[in-house]
Image: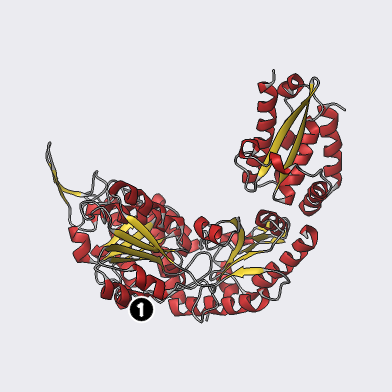
């Protein structure tokens, strides 16, 4: 599934949920079902700066493709970083670097994300792109 | 008696809805909302009499100068200072502490001299002292806080000696509501040292009757924006004999008597410490805020805070598994910092926002104390004159609903 189609998948899910509460609950469910994060990767070098909670984002290169594993000590942030890493996982570094989708705009998350949290989500995205660029 | 329904009519912001719900604002510890009277006073300056203060010989400047200087007098009366000359305008409490830290150490300390603070101080009453401690090789000591978040007076006593040059503690804690017994501490400080005693009034002055002469302290600093006034204006009050002997730490216009190419003579207090164009519009806004509070009566404001605090104590302790950082002493502010094992404070504050409840999550600029308790973050509810018991009910109910989702 391409980045674009994964974005559309999440957009459809979030659009159906009418209230911010339900959108957050969805992110919380995503967080609860996320994969366990390997403790040895809980290192400062993998931390996403500028988040209100602690967020870790680790790249894994497999053949020509990049995957990401992630975690946060807060549920909503973990749900958000899971969703964002899912969108970009399984793509080549080049595709990730060239992707110009405005996630915040697409998800209409602006209504539920405070400016500080938007900044956190922006930094998650930047870390993903930095990893991709570093591998080119 | 405070009539919250009437008060709320003066605050345009309470017409707002958050997520289609009435706004429950419980973050006055960070900043208060502003009544129309304050907004109008400031608007009035810009629309009718705006001109820079001091030395203008024309009508507008004279009017603005008079209004600005009148606020000094209002501040003096509000905290019962002996003279309005001792009221120094700053940008806020943080600016006040930076001024005090610089001015009280410049040419006045020797390496090894000591500064005594408490463990529950706001960063504004820690970091400025750390800066000068590094510069002059001073030692900072922190007074222990007990299990009820009260200052350990025996510990304070053991930390005071002839090397103590500054003692600076909160008048009302922004995390636990703790209100230390300032008079008792003042006596102790005088007995055991020649230190200058400073009170952080950021939370105390908005909520309680303050009488600096009765407290016996040397300095107090507070912010306008936490007491219905605008941001960018605050006050340092200090005893005249101390202020007269301090050197200015900022130079510029307005703070001088005479300037030569190679030197300058300072203006008398308070102007010696107020370089450049002051935030006179904000000061006039603060004056209107003081009028508003005086109109309500600070005794009533105090009583209202006590009532809400008692109500908050009653209902919040009934929430299962909640841990509360709040002094249960008879005298304490209406400030509750909460946490729950296994639930992140930011998740809770985000979920509370979906219920229209505004609380703050984080370390509230009291990070060393959070670290001591081994907690990353708490979420904090603070009340002011426009809050009522119903706000705390909404907070509790929304909290329980949010926990159902998060636990």
Residue B44, visible in the rendered structure: no
Horizontally, is B18 left or right of B279 in the view? right
Question: Residue A73 vs residue B297: left or right?
Answer: right
The answer to whether residue B158 shows anywhere in this view is yes
| Of the pair B253 and A66, the residue shown nearer to us | A66
Label 1: how many residues lie within 10 Å, few (<14), some (14-19) or many (20+)?
few
Where residue B163 sits, quadrant-wise, is bottom left
Q: Position of residue B139 (x, y in %)?
A: 33, 56
Residue drawn 45% across the image and 62% down it = B121
Q: Please tell me which residue is depicted at 73% across the width and 65% down the height of the picture.
A: B398
Q: In percent of the image, x 72 and y 60: which residue is there?
A: B355
With respect to residue B147, does B222 lie above or below? above
Q: Residue B308 appears at what percent x and percent y?
A: 58, 76
Q: In this view, does B249 lie above or below A61?
A: below
x, y percent for residue B128: 37, 52
Most distant residue in the front direction: A40
Residue at image x 46%, y 73%? B179
Q: Nearer the viewer, residue B143 or B198?
A: B143
> What kind of element bears circle 1?
helix
Please identify the quarter of the rendering in which residue B75 is found: bottom left
Q: Which colour scheme is used?
A: secondary structure
Q: Is residue B223 left or right of residue B24?
A: left
Which corner quadrant holds the C terminus of chain B?
bottom right
**Quarter residue B21 falls in:** bottom right
Give the residue number, with chain letter if any, for mark 1: B184
Q: Give residue A15's position: percent from left, percent from top.
A: 83, 43
* Numbered-mark total: 1
Q: Mark 1 lies on which chain?
A: B
Q: Nearer the viewer, residue B234 or B70?
A: B234
């Amino acid at each position: 599934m391409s980045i674009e189609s994964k974005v559309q998948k999440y957009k459809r899910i979030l659009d159906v949920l009418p209230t911010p509460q339900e959108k957050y609950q969805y992110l919380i469910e995503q967080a609860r079902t996320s994969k366990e994060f390997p403790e040895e990767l809980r290192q400062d070098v993998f931390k996403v700066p500028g988040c209100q909670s602690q967020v870790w984002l680790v790249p894994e290169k497999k053949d020509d493709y990049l995957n990401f594993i992630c975690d946060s000590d807060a549920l909503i942030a973990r749900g958000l970083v899971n969703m964002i890493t899912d969108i970009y996982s399984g793509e080549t570094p080049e595709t990730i670097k060239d992707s110009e989708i405005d996630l915040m705009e697409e998800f209409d998350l602006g209504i539920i994300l405070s400016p500080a949290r938007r900044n956190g989500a922006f930094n998650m995205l930047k870390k993903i792109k930095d990893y991709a660029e570093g591998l080119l | 008696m405070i009539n919250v329904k009437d008060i709320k009519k003066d605050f345009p912001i309470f017409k707002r809805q958050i997520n289609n719900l009435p706004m429950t604002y419980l973050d006055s510890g960070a900043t208060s909302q502003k009544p129309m009277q304050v907004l109008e006073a400031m608007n009035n300056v810009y629309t009718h009499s705006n001109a820079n203060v001091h030395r203008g010989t024309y009508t507008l400047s004279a009017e603005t100068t008079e209004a600005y200087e009148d606020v000094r007098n209002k501040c003096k009366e509000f905290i019962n200072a002996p003279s309005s000359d001792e009221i120094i305008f700053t940008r806020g409490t943080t600016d006040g502490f930076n001024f005090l830290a610089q001015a009280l150490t410049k040419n006045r300390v020797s390496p090894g001299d000591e500064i005594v603070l408490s463990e529950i101080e706001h960063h504004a009453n820690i970091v400025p002292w750390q800066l000068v401690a590094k510069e002059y090789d001073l030692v900072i000591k922190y007074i222990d806080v007990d299990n009820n978040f009260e200052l350990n007076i025996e510990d304070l006593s053991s930390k005071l000696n002839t090397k103590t040059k500054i003692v600076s503690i909160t008048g009302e804690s922004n995390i636990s509501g703790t209100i230390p017994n300032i008079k008792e501490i003042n006596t102790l400080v005088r007995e055991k040292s020649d230190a200058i005693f400073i009170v952080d009034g950021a939370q105390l002055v908005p909520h309680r009757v303050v009488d600096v002469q009765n407290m016996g302290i040397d300095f107090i600093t507070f912010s306008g924006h936490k007491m219905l006034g605008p941001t960018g204006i605050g006050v340092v009050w200090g005893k005249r004999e101390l202020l007269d002997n301090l050197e200015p730490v900022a130079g510029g216009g307005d703070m001088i008597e005479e300037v030569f190419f190679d030197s300058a003579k300072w203006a008398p207090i308070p102007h010696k410490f107020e370089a450049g164009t002051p935030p006179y519009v904000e000061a006039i806004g603060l004056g209107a805020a003081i009028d508003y509070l005086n109109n309500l009566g600070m005794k009533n404001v105090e009583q209202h805070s006590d009532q809400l605090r008692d109500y908050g104590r009653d209902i919040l302790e009934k929430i299962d598994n909640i841990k509360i950082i709040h002094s249960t002493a008879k005298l304490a502010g209406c400030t509750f910092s909460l946490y729950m094992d296994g639930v992140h404070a930011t998740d809770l504050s985000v979920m509370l926002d979906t219920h229209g409840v505004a609380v703050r999550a984080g370390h509230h600029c009291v990070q060393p104390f959070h670290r001591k308790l081994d907690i990353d973050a708490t979420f904090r509810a603070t009340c002011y004159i426009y809050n009522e018991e119903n706000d705390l009910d909404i907070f509790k109910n929304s909290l329980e609903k949010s926990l159902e989702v998060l636990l």
